[in-house]
Structures are given as C-alpha cells and as structure tokens.
Amino acid sequence: MRSLTACVLLLVIPISAAAWGEKGHLMINRLAIEVASSKLPEFMNTARGQIIYNAYEPDRWREEGRTSPMNIAQAADHFFDSEYWGAISTIEPDRYSFMNKVAAKNIDLVKIGYLPYAILENYGKLVNAFRFWRNAKTPQDRESARSNAVYVAGVLGHYVGDGSQPMHMSIQYNGWLDTTPNPKNYTKDRTLHSRYEAAYVNAAVEAAVVRRKIQPPHRLNNVWDSIKQHLTQAFADLEPMYELEKTGEFNPEQPRMKGTDFIVTELARAATMLSNLWYTAWVESGEPVADQNAKE
C-alpha cells in the first residue's frame, strides 16, 4: 500500500513547482535576518550567510530525483491544496490527526499537501535548538546547538516563503485546471507558476523595494493561529493574482507596477512572518516547557 501511495505521489505533486525560485527564497531569509538580528542571539547574525543559503535547501533536495525516497517524503510539505479541505482556520496542529480526518473525508492523502505542518514543526525544532543552546553544559554542546538552530532557521524560511505564494495554497497551482469551472476565464498557461515566481522576480523585484514593506519583528501570541492566518492570506490572494495576470501584469519582459507591487507585498509578508517566528522561537526557548511534566 505504501509503495502504491508513493507512486501516486509522484504523479500528482508538482515536483518542479518551487515557490519563488532561488532569488525570492534567498531574499526572504536575507531580509528577515536583517530586520530581526538585533532581537536574536548574536550567533544568528554572524551566521546570516548560512541562514540565507538554507532558504533554498528544501528545493535542492529535489535534485536527487523524483523517485528518491527523500524527495517523495518531503514533496508534499511545499503546498496545501485548500479546496480539498476548506477553511485553513479549521485544521489542527497535529499532522497525523489531520491526516486521519483527511482520510475519513475520503480526500486523497497525497494530494492535499502539508505545508502548514512543515512550518509549525520546523518552528518547534528551532525552539528546541535555541533552548539547548541556552542550557548547554559544554562549549561543544553549545556549538552543536548553534549549528542546529542556524540550519533549522534557514529551512523554516523556505516553507514560510512557500506559504506566501498563492499558487502553493491551491489546486490551481499552474494555470487554471481544465477539470474545474472557470467562469472568469483565467489563464490555463502551464508556465504561469515558474513565470510568476521565478522569471518575473528575477526580472523585476529588488530587495530594497521589498525591505520597505517589512514590519519589525514581534512576539506572536499564538504561533499556530498566526501560521494559519499567513496561509489564509495567501489563498485569498489567489484570484486577485489571476485577475492581474489577465491584464498582463506578470510578463517578465515587460514588468508593470501593479504586478511588481503584488509580488513585493507577498515577499515582504513572508519576511515579516519569518522574522516573527524566529523572534518568538527565541523568546519561547527561554521559558519553561509547557507540558514538560506530562506523562508520556
């Protein structure tokens, strides 16, 4: 059964659809560390080159081939097809409990995607790495915890970036599907995904412009709710993005102001969210573990 599921996964998941392309992902992490570094431990600022590099790491894993077990396992963490489930606000923080409910609704487990959990789980890993850095008993342990924090912080940025790209929140991930109603006559161009997030960003989006829209980091009162709100906003931007595409706003050979500003806003929202998650993880790591006395 698991072998069959893996084979189906290769057929339905858009392996080549990588949100923002390298430039956009690196930009998100670069700008996030610029705005958040003063509120984070100094080693985060010192390691900014590594943090920026790791923004693209989950897409580098794809280079091992479509059929590698590693690629099969992580491919669904890059997206969430909202139409299969409904309101993003109703999903729960336990990946496997959610999967049970998906199965109970007869929704295909391999089609829906698990991006919300990739963000939440990597956030948890970052809190843990920060906590072990704070509590390290030896210089060697502290250095290992530092390395873990830097790596996870960078990878977390990738998924936060994926979560700001509208097509990563929808079944309409690369031009409108032939199999769904299309009363507004949205494009069915199967190059839209890469044109929007890579070619256009490469041609028209500058980090300095994105930087002006990024907000200073603050502690998130409820991390899971904030993640769901981040993803809900991206899904809400899906049809406005398709409307802009109809008017020619995402032509990399002729960039236009509205299209550029739309993407700049999404990238800035991702960098703001990432800096908030990093800062919240750092603060939380200095607090007692909420359920440390719970029975296993």
Image: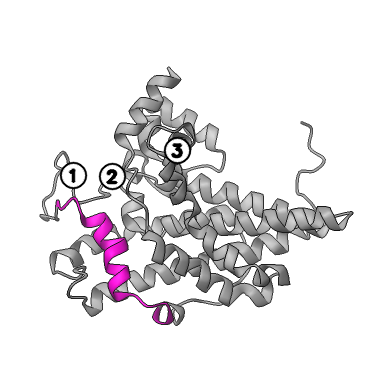
Q: Is residue 200 magenta?
A: yes
Residue 188: x percent and y percent?
14, 51
Q: Which residue is mark 1?
A: 177
Helix, strand or loop status at disc 3: helix
Helix, strand or loop status at disc 2: loop
For the C terminus, give its image quadrant.
top right
Left of 259 or right of it: where is 93?
right
Q: Which residue is mark 2?
A: 171
Circle 1: residue type: Leu
In the rendered structure, find residue 71 and report the number of the disc placed on it.
3
How far apart are the two marked residues, 1 and 3, measured between alpha carbons? Answer: 25 Å
The reply to whether dot 3 and dot 2 touch (C-beta < 8 Å) is no
Q: Is residue 19 magenta?
A: no
Residue at image position (33%, 57%) is 166
Query: Of callouts 1 and 2, which one flags the residue occurring earlier in the amino acid sequence?
Result: 2
Q: Which residues lie in the magenta part?
A: 188-209
